Amino acid sequence: MPRLLIVHHSPSRSMQALLEQVVSGAHDPDVQEAGGVEVVVRAALEASADDVLAADGYVLGTTANFGYMSGALKHFFDSTFLAVGGALDPSGAPADGADAGTTAGRPYGLWLHGRYDLTGAERSVHAIVGALGWRQGYDVLGVLGELDDAALESAYALGATIAALLVD
């Protein structure tokens, strides 16, 4: 059975609500009927390289703090990048596909929540997953300010879509 790893930093009620919807989406009845996906949820400070290597796809959740991803998600990447085969060329840019790591080609999704601007946080995550060779499997869910029903529905769709990609 394919495995979906959800790595998140959810220090607020809003991030927790989005996480719950992503997890619910990953357990969508249509996905389960199509063969199912094992869903593993890890806080960013607890996720390991073994978790990444054992997964077939990923959903990442982070707050946007001072124009960057959360320190917890950055720690996750810092502590797993080399162990999972992250690849950079000699200039420090993401390596091309020929040199990409062992997790290259696996789908990922991303949700972010912030109060003012998500641009830097989104860009920083994309830079790292690009160096891992992961492929974006769904539109980024970026939520500024208070959550509404549309954001929660989008979080569900994010989880369901990435999970569905693993059973196709």
Image (cartoon, helix red, strand yellow):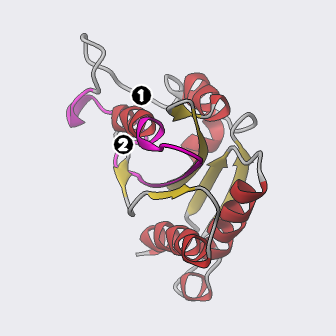
Q: Nearer the viewer, residue 6 or 111?
A: 111
Task: Name the spot of residue 13 as percent of width and height, x first.
Answer: 78, 57
Give the labeled residue for mark 1.
86
Tell me, for residue 118, which label it has, or none: none
Circle 2 residues within 10 Å: few <14, some 14–19, many ≥20: many
Tell me, for residue 104, which label it has, or none: 2
Q: Residue sitting at 58 percent across and 29 percent down?
A: 74
Task: Name the spot of residue 162 as percent of width and height, x first.
Answer: 48, 66
Say what secondary structure mark 1 lies in. Answer: loop
Q: Residue sitting at 52 percent across and 72 percent down?
A: 154
Does residue 111 appear to the left or right of 168 in the view shown? right
Q: Amino acid at mark 1?
A: Gly
- The image quadrant where one finds the N terminus is bottom right
Q: Nearer the viewer, residue 67 or 158?
A: 67
> Is residue 15 rendered magenta in the image?
no
Task: Name the spot of residue 126 as percent of width and height, x first.
Answer: 38, 40
Vertical arrangement, residue 106 with respect to residue 132, above or below: below
**How far apart are the alpha carbons under marks 1 and 2?**
9 Å
Q: Which residues are magenta?
A: 95-122
Say what secondary structure mark 2 lies in. Answer: loop
Q: Nearer the viewer, residue 110 or 4?
A: 110
Circle 1 residues within 10 Å: few <14, some 14–19, many ≥20: many
Task: Name the spot of residue 53 as percent of width and height, x first.
Answer: 55, 41
- The image quadrant where one finds the C terminus is bottom left
Q: Taking the image as drawn, is residue 144 in sight?
A: yes
Does residue 59 appear to the left or right of 102 in the view shown? right
Vertical arrangement, residue 130 with respect to residue 6, above or below: above
Image quarter of residue 15: bottom right
Vertical arrangement, residue 43 with respect to residue 41, above or below: above
Of labels 1 and 2, earlier in sequence is 1
